[in-house]
Image (cartoon, coloured by chain):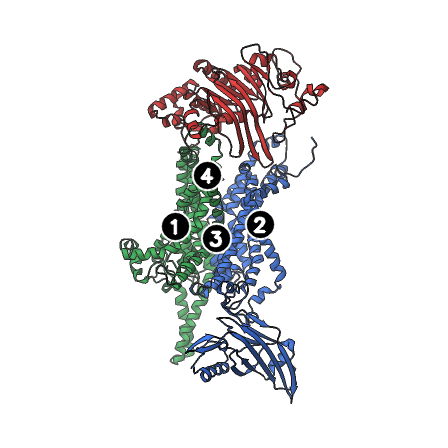
Amino acid sequence: MALLDVRNLRLYYQTTKGILKALDGVSFELEEGETLAVVGETGSGKSTLAKAITRVWERNVSLVDGEVYFEGEEVLHMPEDRFRREIRWRKIAMVPQASMNALNPVITIGEQMIEPLVLSGVPKGEALRLAQDSLESVGLPRDVVARYPHQLSGGMKQRVVIAMAVMTRPKLLILDEPTSALDVMTQANIMNLLKELKARLKLTYIFITHDLALASELADSVAVMYAGKLAEIGSSEDMYGAPAHPYTQGLMASMPTLRTDKQLAYIPGEVPSLIDPPRGCRFHPRCPYFAKDKALKGLCDDMEPPAFELKPWTGRRHLAACWLYK
Amino acid sequence: MGLLRTLAIRSVNLIIILFAVLFAISYVLSGPAAQLLQTQIQLEARAIVSQLAKSGHYTPTQIQDLYNSIVQQLYKAYGLDQPAYIRVFYIIYNMLVFNWGYSYFPDVYGVASGKVSDIIASALPGTVLLDTFGILLSAFIGIQIGLRSALRYGSRVDRAVMYYGAVSNGLPQWWVGILMLLVFSFYLSTIRSPIYFPSGGILSPKYYSMWFASPLSVFTDPGALADLLWHFALPLATVLIVNVGGWAYFARTVALNTAQEDFVTFAKMKGLPDGRITGRYILRPSAPAILTSILLGLPFIIFGGFIITEAVFRWWGLGYVYNLAIFAPTPDLPVIVALTYASTLLYIALVLVLEVLYIVLDPRIRSG
Amino acid sequence: MAARREFRILGMTPGEIWRGFVSTTTGKIALAFFSIMVAFSIYALVALPPNFGNLWNTPSYWQANPKYAPPAWINFFAGDAYAPQMAVRDFNFTAGSSGGVGYAVIQFAVDDSYAHPWRNLYVIVRSPAVYNASTVAYLTVERPDGKTVQLGPVSVNSQFVALGLSPQIISQVNSFYQSNFGVQNAVPAGSSAIPYLFYTARGGDLVPLKGTYRFTITMYSFSGNTVLNRKDLGVVLEGEVYGLMGTDFLGHDLWLGLLAGFPIDLAVGILTAAIVVTLAILIGIVAAFYGGLVDEVLTRITDFFILLPAFPLLIVFSVLFQWSIWDAIVFLAAVSWGGSARVIRAMVMQIKSSQFIESALAAGAGRGWILRNHILPMVMPYTLYLFVVNVPGGILTLSAINFFNLAGAELPTWGNILAYADEFGALTSGYWWWVVPPGLLITFVAVTFIFVAMGLEPVVNPRLRHA
């Protein structure tokens, strides 16, 4: 049984210019122990996906729809109180974007780390010890528990947040751009840390990033999002080796590599508006196949493609939402 | 330690400013006010002398000499025989050593000794009761309402609080006082309701001496206390109606701003219960801003709309005394200068207290 | 994408700002209030004569009005019990002269259905030739009960003749009651006799007699051929109630007075705010922009002004120097800019140290250029907000000063009206129409600006926008 089963997840925002369809029918499965990288451009809906799964979204949400099954149980429509007590942070934890700002400036690190534990009954002394262990495991000195956030550097704060997230041994850990605000050295350190934690604690990750190359270091599978929809999902081998969706192909082609001399390509055009998305397949205005192939007219620009199953190289299912694979 | 040094520098700055304010006030007041006093003295002297002249016992020259000597003596008594800048220094010196002198018109205040410090002392309890307590109570109630309202953002209660806050900020406090008197004092007594409120004053006259001698004794005497509360009801209601809204709106805004911060979202993600998020993640970080506002607001409010509110209710407090001093036949300088000085001093003291509190509450400043 | 140069402030075009403003409920209310306020101000400027300020202080202008009279519409709730102010317009007029004596006869009828009849009767003669000559007037009243009261002669020696308190008339009314009803001293001492024309005696008590009353006023002019013209004459019955908003101690039509207050109080508030904001921007930008010693000095000066107890000083100086309202405005603005200046300074400091300024400087941009193209565009929208925020303070403070009868007691501002209300015992006599409307209007104008500021908040504070 899959650890996480997302079916047709939708999340819409109400804005002054209209309804913004940030997430418009995303479905996928995630096995235990798997690391899924969710990649896409800004505005593709990847952060929104994380918010939807952890049920922490903004005030101006106008619609939340679909189903999310975690360990077989539906959690999207679970009563808030139960979700908070049982699922949030215990089973599903998240390291948000720009973690530097995620820490309360007027409370010590230690206080913040032990909060969830103490609230569920763990004695304070033991909780503090666990916190210190956790800090150690992310490579920070134990006495950080007595410090305040402003006394730490950006990289240290990031580690603190990761330490907090793994402290409760969650089943699923979602990381939203955990390294984009850091310098390259720190970035490398954090990635090593994540790999090490994955091996040691057997964590399941959802790793959200816009950086394909970074994703390849950690990911078992990759999901590519575009304009609020899932364009393609499959194992890393499939995705990096034989990308099916035109958008994925374009992304891969634009990634520089050290080893081969590659002509860098780029995808022309801009990310579409989420309030008024293009009719049919949302990528069709920028799709090279659509531009060249007259037979696709009337199809890609008229009807939204469902997810077609492709033959995978490995055990993981490979799906692409593109009329080319009808 | 860097902390003490910062505080020390701030204190020195504030004291310099206190001096500057004091100097400016004394200088400006002693100038034209002195003119008025001179004219007043001359008029009085003339009145005295003309009485004597009518009796026919004195020659014109004697009258003239008498007039001159009276004027001179009075000038000397009021310190008018010296040039302006010397007068100013005397005033400043006396203010600093709390030698606040005597009022020009002691009868106005009904305080036997006529000493300014006594007058101020007699009015201080009234001000503390109405202004300070009133504002603190408003702040307490208002902040509670504002914070709870922020948590229910967008609901009808929240919108109501928001509008109430905005409207109450536009209400002239003294006018609300007038309305209260109109409705609860005049109309209630007109329809011969058994419950009605007095039209002014802090106490019934029979309790005056008790209050002036020792205000605390009023609190132990049930009859006097009831009388005080009876007089206190309308002014306090006025203060609350006008001020609770503003505090609620302010607390709400601060809380809403803090609630947008990333660490609040993260706290939610951590699965913390709402109560804890409110207390630790919204209130604690907001506390410095709110406290700043309370402490900054106090002295100004005393010397802002309260002067008029106290006047409307004829409430024996510093504001009413100020009112009496200003509208005395000529402005009662010693009282005015002393009161202005006292308020500025109080303000500076509070600012210093605030700086210390801020440092305690916001660790980011500590190692700064 | 076509790059049409749109005018943008803080990333929004004026159209978007406007739409954002009116999309909130607060914005809509603010817009409504603001329109009402402006409409009334314009109406006041148009409908009132330009010398209204002077007229307000000319007691003779308001002579014919009742004093301390409630508004006329209370009759709606009181079942038509109070006689309204009546300027008699259609009266029968005959004039002529005989034997060197000019005469005029005015006849009219009034319907008295009021429990509280008219208080006084005024004869207005607008021709100096007439009232400077020796002219007298006789008054005959035919009552509904058939009795007739003969009054006069009353000497017409000024433009405005009040009949009620004339001793002659009082004694004549008293003798009318004595001879017809046997009531002694019907008219209480010091009262006007006119209401008692409309009473009758029943069992020893005086009760109103309702019905139609016919008045005949005959005027004789004894010197020469003074001609009495219809257009020079007027008759006014002073009512128990008056107008839309009642009257005060002087008979001022409060509706007009309150109306006049609109442009004045508005001007006061706007002027104060304009000066405050100008000073705040100047000092704030200069201090933050130049930094160093200039900043230190200006910050100290700002602190000084913030610590200055502005309101008490305003009172003291207004008393000492006999300030007009414009003096008071300038002083108040000159000491109140401190808080706003601090905010502007903080803003500019923040912009100055932000990264794109650094890069602009690195690219060789001059300070003036940065000021014009980066700092000012960010500060300007906030300026509007700051301006709106400062207006209520100005209006409230200056109304307070007016309440003490300082700084322009002669203008019909709302604070002044309240000052007289308090002085003339409106509180102890329950003249609510004198007390409630002025304060309500002060609140209305202040609240309008507060609502406008609230509506603008999302525009200047992007964080609040989505909510």
Q: Position of residue A32 (x, y in %)?
A: 47, 16
Q: Is residue C344 left or right of residue B89?
A: right
Quarter-wise, where is residue B72 in the image? bottom left
Find the distance from the CA under tag 2 to the CA under tag 4: 27 Å
Q: Nearer the viewer, mark 4 or mark 3?
A: 4
Q: Nearer the viewer, mark 3 or mark 2?
A: 2
Q: Nearer the viewer, mark 1 or mark 4?
A: 4
Secondary element under disc 2, as helix, strand or loop, is helix
Circles 2 and 4 in contact, beta carbons < 8 Å: no
Q: Identify the residue under disc 3.
A: B171
Q: Position of residue B69 (x, y in %)?
A: 40, 70
Q: Position of residue B44 (x, y in %)?
A: 42, 70
**Three-letter code for the amino acid on which mark 1 is drawn:** Gly
Q: Identify the residue under disc 1.
A: B134
Q: Residues within 10 Å of mark 3 (few under 14, many from 20)?
A: many
Secondary element under disc 1, as helix, strand or loop, is helix
Secondary element under disc 4, as helix, strand or loop, is loop
Of the image marks 3 and 1, the number of the one nearer the N terminus:
1
Q: Which mark is residue C32?
A: 2
Q: Nearer the viewer, mark 2 or mark 1?
A: 2
Circles 3 and 2 on the same chain: no
